[in-house]
Amino acid sequence: MIMETVAWVASALVFLALFMKTMIPLRTLAIVSNLAFIGYALMGLHYGIFDKVLPILVLHLSLLPLNIVRLQQMRQLIRTIREGSAEESAVEALIPYMTRKVFAEGEALFLKGETAGEIFFIQVGRVVIPELNKDLREGTMFGEVGIFTPEGRRSASAVCARRSVIYNIHRDDVIQLYDQNPKFGLFVVRLLSRYVTENVDAIVEFQTTLSHAQAVDARLMDSPAVPHAADCEIAARGAS
């Protein structure tokens, strides 16, 4: 009777885990259900049916460490997001769809001109954008611009400056979340606005520098101390 009750409780926990919409509660319930099924299988020793429940024991002994590791990874990722982003509630919506990858120093995440298929989040490490001479630190999300442009291509490259742990989410999942999650949609709009603002500032700075250089060049050309090209040519002919 006790063994049957434990089996029903373990099954109910699995059922409840399937209803969880976020990863932390799902993994937590999965761990509790693993423990319940392990207890259920071990009770088979007392009731003399251990050989019949041995596959259940092996299965949940294998799933238990996996669920613990995944839960720890999710919690660590959320801590990184909260430390590096003011929009953690929106970014946390990405976590169930993200894939964790480790990149070596000098390894490229994507190259300029490639098809944009993913958005990236830096958990550990540093990424550089060579064309813009820009460093991206831990807690930064990037790569969203190419997802939403009509061409769908990368406008610059991204290379790991050192060994980095990067989470990425596929373009299809991003678009689905953009349609379904208003907070995430607003977050993406703010990311794109930040990109536009940074580029406008860079253009203004470039134009200011260019105008200053042109003004200096004009003053030098008008100065009598600096001979014009035509004067140099006439002097050279006279000397010959």
Image: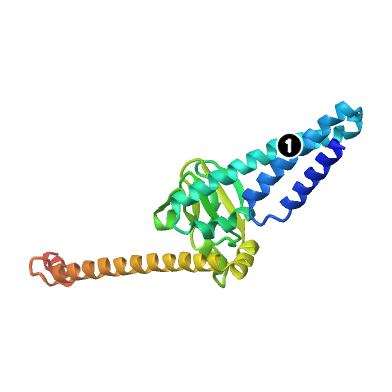
- Quadrant where the image shows the N terminus: top right
Which residue is drawn at the image coordinates 61% and 65% (left, top)? 177
Mark 1: few, some, or many residues within 10 Å (few <14, many ≥20)? some
Q: Residue 187, position in %: x, y?
A: 50, 65
- Mark 1 lies on residue: 35
Give the color scheme: rainbow, by chain, secondary structure or one colour: rainbow
Q: Residue 124, position in %: x, y?
A: 49, 44
- Which of the 4 quarters of the picture holds residue 203? bottom left
- Which of the 4 quarters of the picture holds residue 129? bottom left
- Outermost residue to the front: 1
Q: Residue 156, position in %: x, y?
A: 48, 59
Q: Is residue 128 visible from the viewing direction of this image?
A: no
- Outermost residue to the left: 224
Q: Is residue 84 visible from the viewing direction of this image?
A: yes
Left or right placement of residue 143 versus residue 39 in this view:
left
Left or right placement of residue 16 versus residue 90 in this view:
right
Q: Residue 79, position in %: x, y?
A: 50, 47
Q: Amino acid at mark 1?
A: Leu
Which residue is drawn at the image coordinates 91% and 27% (left, top)? 48
Which residue is drawn at the image coordinates 82% and 45% (left, top)? 8
Closer to the camera in the image, 70 or 175: 70
Closer to the camera in the image, 49 or 106: 49
Closer to the camera in the image, 41 or 83: 41
- Quadrant where the image shows the C terminus: bottom left
Q: Secondary structure at mark 1?
A: helix
Left or right placement of residue 1 versus residue 144 in this view:
right
